[in-house]
Image (cartoon, rainbow, N blue to C red):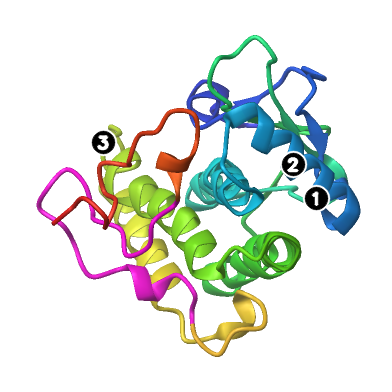
């Protein structure tokens, strides 16, 4: 398997099936009626004012699948993120809804052949084949803007490459690879890697390196419309 499980657990991977009330097999997210029932249940759990708010918070948590996957990709391994291999696991005892990702078969495919071509196929599998279908259905069911959903994912990808990986004690070669991967992800002109888009849906949120701890968002994720009633530190509503 050759995975750093300790690190991946910190990025919300779990090797435990929890089977809590909000645990869900990701294949069920592709069913509009089932997805709506799930988002309504999540709305009650987090005290969201409506299902649009709940949908945004859902994707903020689901973004960590991208984090786990891209972290392993930069380390030249590809996880199996097919819908039938992944489930979202939660604990009913947790006061805050922070789900984890469980892989029925925790296996990886090592880099083969040309890395640029391999990387492109990895990114296409993540965004076009997995993330985009969920965002399409979620936006259609709840009417939440995809601009909000994509930024919810973007902020954690930026965090992964600008903070998590660079804070590790790794070789210069891996740092260089991580930087190249990040630049490719946020500037790739090939819209086919992300789904039915004329432009890279992540690129609009990247405004260059930041010298402060936090990067201000463009959109609001509606966190203040849950029972926490708290704004994100990077919320555009308060950043001014």
Q: Is residue 107 visible?
A: no
- Measured as percent of width and height from the top left, residue 202 is found at 44, 70
Question: For this view, does 55 lie left or right of residue 199?
Answer: right
Image point 23% across, 53% down: which residue?
A: 215
Q: CA distance from mark 2 to mark 3?
A: 38 Å
Q: Is residue 46 above or below residue 38?
A: above
Q: Secondary structure at mark 1?
A: helix
Q: Magenta segment range?
A: 200-221
- Measured as percent of width and height from the top left, residue 39 is found at 73, 44
Q: Nearer the viewer, residue 58 or 165?
A: 58
Q: Main secondary structure of the magenta part?
A: loop
Instruction: Report if the CB atoms under discs 2 and 1 are less than 8 Å apart.
Output: yes
Q: Is residue 23 above or below residue 159?
A: above
Q: Secondary structure at mark 3?
A: loop
- Measured as percent of width and height from the top left, residue 150 is found at 51, 63
Circle 2 is placed at which residue position? Answer: 40
Among all residues in the image, which is located at the extreme top? 93
**Residue 99 in magenta?**
no
Question: Mark 2 or mark 3, which is nearer to you?
Answer: 2
Image point 62% across, 56% down: which residue?
A: 111
Q: Is residue 180 above or below residue 156?
A: below
Q: How many residues crowd mark 3 within 10 Å: few (<14), some (14–19), many (20+)?
A: few
For residue 54, what is the image quadrant? top right
Circle 1 is placed at which residue position? Answer: 36
Circle 3 is placed at which residue position? Answer: 167
Q: How many residues crowd mark 2 within 10 Å: few (<14), some (14–19), many (20+)?
A: some
Q: Earlier in the sequence, mark 3 or mark 1?
A: 1
């Amino acid at each position: 398997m050759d995975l750093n499980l300790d690190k991946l657990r910190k990025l919300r991977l779990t090797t435990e099936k929890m089977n809590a009330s909000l645990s869900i097999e990701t294949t069920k997210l592709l069913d509009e009626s089932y997805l709506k029932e799930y988002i309504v249940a999540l709305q009650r759990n987090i005290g969201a004012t409506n299902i649009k708010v709940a949908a945004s918070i859902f994707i903020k948590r689901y973004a960590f699948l991208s984090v786990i996957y891209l972290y392993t990709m930069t380390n030249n391994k590809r996880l199996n993120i097919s819908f039938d291999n992944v489930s979202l696991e939660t604990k009913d005892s947790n006061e805050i809804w922070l789900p984890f990702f469980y892989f029925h078969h925790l296996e990886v495919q090592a880099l083969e052949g040309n890395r640029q071509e391999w990387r492109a196929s990895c990114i296409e599998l993540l965004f076009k084949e997995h993330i985009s279908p969920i965002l399409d259905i979620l936006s259609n069911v709840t009417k939440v803007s995809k601009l909000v959903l994509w930024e919810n994912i973007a902020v954690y990808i930026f965090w992964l490459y600008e903070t998590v990986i660079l804070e590790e004690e790794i070789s210069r070669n891996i740092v260089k690879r991580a930087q190249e991967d990040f630049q490719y992800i946020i500037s790739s002109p090939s819209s086919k890697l992300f789904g039915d888009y004329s432009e890279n849906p992540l690129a609009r949120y990247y405004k260059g390196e930041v010298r402060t701890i936090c990067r201000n968002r463009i959109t609001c994720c509606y966190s203040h419309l849950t029972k926490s009633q708290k704004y994100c530190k990077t919320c555009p509503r308060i950043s001014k």
